Image: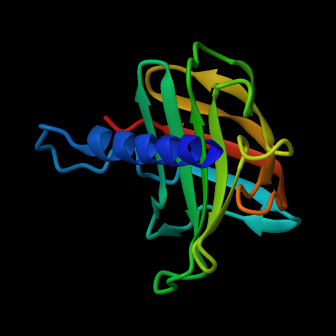
């Protein structure tokens, strides 16, 4: 059942990002993709920083009412195929505050994914999975804050520790 919840939340987050990035505006600008959208943290003591190319971040942020996602992609270089991804997806965000995200709160999901071994660790997997997200700024243009997570893998309940997490997302218009 937990796998269905994880798959469902991941699918919903991906669908939300795809649909919210579409626009009838022909302005041609890349709003919400500047260096001011990022997720940075330490994953088991190793630095995770959102990758950017010529000032354009591989971070995205989207908002649909009170549902918010911020994603950062980290990679070694522009040609590297291995990626690491942190996604923060929160439901019922009404303003600045502390949001506890785990299997019992139904407040969203915080996840960490490594493409090299196709493995993810989430805040809602196993009993060990939990995250705390502190939103310090939230308005129609952006979200900003800090987070920590003990992510659990739903296959074997192994964990990853994410500390010193910071994020800022400028919403895609």
Count of all numbered marks drawn on residues in the image: 0
Q: Residue at x 65, y 50 (%)?
A: 111
Residue nearest the viewer, comparing 50 with 90: 90
User: Can you give x and y, in whole percent of width and height, for residue 15 in the image?
Assistant: 35, 44
User: Can you give x and y, in whole percent of width and height, for residue 126 in the image?
Assistant: 79, 46
Q: In the figure, residue 161 lies in which quadrant?
A: bottom right
Q: Farthest residue toward the front?
A: 1
Residue nearest the viewer, comparing 133 with 37: 133
Q: Could you tell me which quadrant the N terminus lies in?
A: top right
Q: Residue at x 15, y 44 (%)?
A: 27
Q: Residue at x 58, y 13 (%)?
A: 94
User: Can you give x and y, in whole percent of width and height, for residue 4 in the image?
Assistant: 54, 45
Relative to residue 117, is residue 48 depicted above or below?
Answer: above
Tell me the colour scheme of the image: rainbow
Relative to residue 116, is residue 120 depicted above or below?
Answer: above
Q: Residue at x 66, y 43 (%)?
A: 110
Q: Farthest residue toward the top?
A: 94
User: Can you give x and y, in whole percent of width and height, for residue 73 in the image?
Assistant: 55, 63
Q: Could you tell me which quadrant the C terminus lies in?
A: top left
């Amino acid at each position: 059942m937990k796998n269905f919840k994880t798959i469902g939340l991941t699918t919903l987050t991906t669908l939300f990002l795809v649909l919210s990035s579409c626009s009838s505006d022909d302005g041609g600008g890349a709003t919400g993709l500047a260096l001011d959208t990022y997720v940075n943290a330490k994953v088991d003591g190793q630095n995770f920083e959102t990758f950017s190319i010529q000032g354009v971040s591989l971070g995205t942020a989207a908002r649909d009412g009170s549902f918010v996602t911020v994603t950062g992609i980290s990679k070694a270089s522009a040609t590297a195929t291995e990626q690491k991804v942190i996604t923060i997806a929160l439901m019922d965000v009404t303003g600045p505050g502390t949001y506890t995200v785990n299997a019992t709160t139904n407040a969203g999901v915080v996840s960490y994914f490594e493409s090299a071994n196709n493995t993810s660790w989430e805040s809602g997997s196993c009993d060990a999975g939990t995250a705390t997200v502190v939103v310090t700024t939230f308005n129609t243009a952006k979200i900003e804050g800090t987070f920590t997570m003990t992510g659990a893998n739903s296959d074997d309940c192994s964990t990853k520790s994410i500390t010193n997490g910071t994020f800022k997302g400028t919403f895609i218009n």
